[in-house]
Structure formats: structure tokens, C-alpha cells
Image (cartoon, helix red, strand yellow):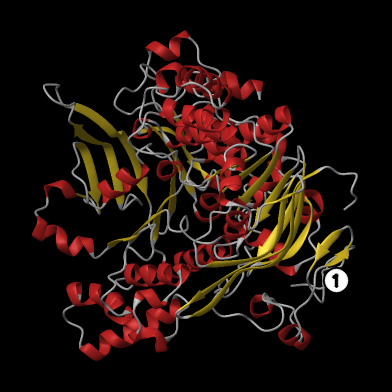
Amino acid sequence: MSGAFLKLDALRVYFSVSGGWLKPARKLKAVDGVSLEIAPGEALGIVGESGCGKSTLARAILQLVDVTAGQVVWLGRPIESLTVRQMRPLRASMQIVFQDPLASLNPRMTVGEIVAEPLRVHRADLSREQRQTEVAQMLERVGLSRDQINRYPHEFSGGQCQRIGIARAMILKPKLLVCDEPVSALDVSIQAQIINLLEDLKRESGTSILFVSHNLAVVRRLCERVLVLYLGKTMELAPSAALFGAPLHPYTRGLLASVPIPDPDLQPARLETSLTGELPSPLAPPSGCVFRTRCEFAIERCTVEVPVLEQLPDNRQIACHRWQELQLKA
Amino acid sequence: MTSARSNVLEIESLSVRYETPDGAVQAVADISLEIAAGECIGVVGESGAGKSQAFLAVMGLLAPNAQVAGDARLRGRELLGADPRALRDLRGAELAMIFQDPMTSLAPHIVVGDQIAEVLVVHKNMSWREARAQALQLLEQAQVTDAARRLTQYPHELSGGMRQRVMIAIALACDPVMLIADEPTTALDVSVQAQILSLLKRLMRERGMALALITHDLGVVAGLADQVAVLYAGRIVESGSVRKLLKNPSHPYTAALLRSMPRIDAPVDEPLVAIGGQPPSPRQPIAGCPFHPRCAAAPSRCTTERPELRRIDGAQVACHFPRSNSASAITL
């Protein structure tokens, strides 16, 4: 086996945006040629600013949005070729946890019903009793008690609702768990609880995790590798230690410098070294390197030539014309 | 504090309470704060800690069923219970506030330029023509790119960061002495967050304006604040200089908050110490210290007797067993 069970091959997701009356529709390139592999048990972080395409990429893998071009290869099989019916058993092995914990739970179902539903759909072989036992075990595993099985979502706090969402996703023992900003909506003191829970689940179950987040400190803790996206394109893909220890791409550096740290001796100076400007409209991406309009190192070449994604020896990939020069300077 | 400091805002024993069909809700309990000119105070707490409620009370923007007690003085003038007309003159002029969600704070059907100009027309009796010219300058001060074109745009045409800059421009229109920023960057990307914070810092320095920065993020506080007040269950549990609180917190809650935050500069193998349980509901008051159900070191005294704020190591701390300054004498 090649090691990877999920492979993206030049994945593209374009949306058609209507231009208005008598104006032609325009293409929004949400994901523009992303290739990567995920190994069993690996956690891959996808980071970038809002609008960079990280959620769309995650949804495309789950076939929740249509793929425009390229392939998602799951256990050796391109999944676009599958019919809805053929896709169904695969869905059991790929699950998702959403950002808003309360909104992603059906308010009219009890917690027990919510967590049991994937079993009802995908594991018809289980008896009612077996289902209930599994649900109770799962609830305890995510830190809730069996007694809460008949309660409704509104009776729980945000952190507890996120635990229920995680229990629902994990009950089918998926091979891939996609987490789309799972802690962003939670209180600070609760975030650590959920991060620790995800760390434990990952260690115990061997499930691969695709972790979409704008919180780089969380990604650094949880993920072995990180993909940095900008306007739908890969800027840098590297093992966490390398990416956070010695970022190569100017965008990665800028993102890292923007993360506030609670140290009054360091943080005031960090504030001034952050990225300038904002993400350009994805409807009109800059020519050449898409990041050049915000890059302090941009030169003429960056405006005309799209940087290719270079494969570096230490399992890193980078798309920047000047990374070698800049590395020498740093 | 000494009277030599020129305090812009003094809050004394502020309490906010609601009588609801489900019982009383104590949103804010006995908070006292002072903010000097040119100073930034970081007000930190989780949802329901009362940080927004306290400052909405200062602004006179609470729901009609709120029962407010205590004092809040802006340059010596009492705000609580002031004549609504007098308050309206102050708000937007001497005292301004920006909110978390810049989309819902702006009127969706009015172009940005007119929303800024309106403040000047109302408070400074400018003509619309003068006010619009001034609005352009304000947008430029808020570092809005392409400011002249923005004037005629609607809020939905702007990015979240731009909208927050427009809010800042509106807030600054009448040169306020006090700006209250309620989670101004929570809805924004980290990159834009840093830009907005750095802008607020510069404006504060240039204008000698006082800033109350309400946030849940201690990293945000570290970049801007001189003083910090940590709120829990409607009360201040610790307050003091930013350096003292972030480097050497005395209250177990402040210390626990710091340790539960994943830091980008900390070793990855360091365990993340989560705070168990959840923030208390203001509907169910807790006997004794409000933090005791989640505090690792809570002897029986903490369950019965509420600790008062007292001065320890140059900070104010409400804890029976504060962490010792020298080392972690109480290991949590």
C-alpha cells in the first residue's frame, strides 16, 4: 500500500457567480489545483484566511460540493465516478464535525437519537440494544454521562454540544474525520477541553483528521502536517515542526506573526509585523503569484509568472519564486 | 489610585441585575474600575462574565428591564441615571463604542460616507457637505484603502475588516475621550485583527484617548493593554498591570486561562491544561467563590465565603488562597 488512503489530484472547485443583468457569469476559483495525500492516522491542518478555500476543500473531499476538475481518490478509487448509491457506504468512513455546535444538532432529537442515527443508517445489522450500548459507550468516551442520553441539545452548553457532534461523527469509527473550525465558537476555557478530546480520540482510534482552522496555535498542537492555502492555491505544505519552526513562504511567515501571544513583552512588537492588506477578491485574483499584492518581497517576476509548487527533500512543498533567497536572508 | 491621575472613566460599585420570569439574573456585581487618559484597559472574561453588560450600562444601552446600581463617571459627570437627552449628546461624541459584528452595527441601506457624516451633522452641527468632506478624512485616518470610493459604497460591499474600520471612523468622528471596543476583532481573521489592533493603538496614542478593550483573548490584551481586569461570573477576580497579570497571575482563574490557551510559541509537548466544567450561569449564583467548582485548589472555605478583592503584589485579587508571587506555591 502506498501509505495514503486519501489522495487529492489537482483538485479544482469553481463556483459560477452571476455577474448581474446582461453580464456574463464569472468563475470563482475556490479551490484551484490542490494535490495532497493523507496517511492513515495522520492529522492534516488546513489554514488560511477566510475565503482562502479551506472549507470548500474539506467539503469537496466529502463530496458535499461538486468537484470541477481533478480527482479525489479514496482507497485507490476515484470517488467522482461513484453513483450516489455507491457513495453511501463510503460516507460511513468519512465524517464531519461542524463549527457551530448547537446549529449542527437537530433540536427535536434527543442526544441518544442524534448519536444513534449514523448507526441506524449505516449499521442496520445492529439490534436496538446493541445500538444503545454503543451510543452510551461513545457518550462516555467524549466526556458525557449515560444519564444524559434522553436530554435534548438545548439542555447542553456549547462545549457539550460539540462533544455530542464529535460522538455522532466518531460512532461509525470513520477512517477520516473532517473538523471544520471545531473550537472557534467555544469559550476559551472550553476550547482546551475539546482540543484535548480530539487529541485523545486521534491517539486511541487511529482516525485520520482533516483539521480546518484559522487558529494556528491549535493546528500546531493537533496536526502532523499543515497545508497553507491562499485564494484556493497551495502556498506551502510541510510537516508542522518545519512549518512552525522555519516557515518558508512569506504568507506563512505573515500568518504566524499575526497570531497573538499573551506576552506583554513580545506582543506589542508582533502587532506591527503582521500581514498588510486583505485577501483580494477571489473573482479577480492577481496575475502571477496570487499572494504578490500583499508580499513585501514581490518582484517583477512575481507579477508575470505563476510560481510552481516545488517539492523539497524534507517532505515540504512551496510555491514561491524567492524562497531560497529569503531563507538565506533570514 | 491617586487623584493625580486624570481618570477619564471611573466606574464604582457597578451592578446590573435583571428580574426575569425565571428568576433574577445578576449580570454584573459590584465592579469598580478606573481608566486614565491615553490608557488601555483590557477587560477579559468568557461569555456571560458580564464584560459587555458592564460597559453597555456605562453607555446607557441596556435593555429597559435592567436594574443598574452604582456610579459611572465620565470626566466627573455621572452617566448612570443621567437625563437621556444629555446621555445622547455624550454618546457618539465624548464616549463612543464599537462592537464585535461590524455588519449588524452599520445600517445596510445607507452608504458608508453618510453614516460617518451623520455623526458630525448631529453632534457638531456641520452641514452635510462639510461632514462628507470630514468623513473622507476620517476614513483615511482609519486606514481605509481607496477611501474616496468607499464613501459611496454600502456596508455589504466591504470586507469585515473594512467595515470595522468604518465603525472606528464613526467612533472617532467627534474625537471621543473614551472608546469602548467590545470584541472588535473576534469576527476577523488574525491578519486583519493585528491590523485593527495596531490601528486602535496608534489612534489611542495620537489622540490621548482612553480605550476599554473587551475581549476573551489574552493575546489581544498583551499587545495593547496597560491594565487588565479579569471578570468571572459578573465580578472582577483580578486586576492590575498587564505585565503582572500575564506574567505572574495571582488568581487561579487567570493562571488557568493562560494555561488553557494553546500558544504558538510554547513547546508542543507541554500539556494543555483545560479548565474543567463550564462558566457559571448568571441565573444560578454560586455560594462562596464563584470559581470554586472549577478551581483545583478550593478548600472548604472557598465554598462558603466569597473572597473580597484585596491588594496583593500590586494587583487586586479576589481569592482566599492566591498563588504566591515567588513560585507556584499552590500548584493547580
Is A124 positioned to the left or the right of B201 in the image?
left
When asked about the image quadrant of residue B307, the answer is bottom right
- Give, as a three-letter code, the residue at label 1: Ala
**Which of the 4 quarters of the picture holds residue B318?**
bottom right
Residue B90, position as x, y percentages in the image: 62, 42
Q: Position of residue A125 (x, y in %)?
A: 17, 82
Q: Residue furthest top?
A: A300
Q: Is residue B149 above or below residue A72?
A: above
- What percent of the width, then of the height, locates residue A2? 33, 49
Which quadrant: the C terminus of chain B? bottom right
Q: Secondary structure at mark 1?
A: loop
Chain assignment, label 1: B
Question: Quick one: label 1, few (<14), some, or many (20+) residues within 10 Å?
Answer: few
Residue drawn at x 65%, y 20% as measured from the top left: A329
User: Does A181 appear above or below B120?
Assistant: below
For the point 62% across and 57% down, the residue is B261
B25 on left or right of A32: right
Q: Is residue A310 visible?
A: no
Work out whether B216 lies above or below A147.
above
Residue B295 falls in which quadrant of the image?
bottom right
Q: Nearer the viewer, residue A171 or A22?
A: A22
Looking at the image, residue A111 sits to the left or right of residue B127; the answer is left
Nearer to me, A12 or B215: B215
* Residue on which the image places disc 1: B329
A174 shown above or below B10? below
Residue closest to the eye, B186 or A305 = B186
B259 or B267: which is nearer to us?
B259
Q: Residue B40: tell me if it is visible.
A: yes
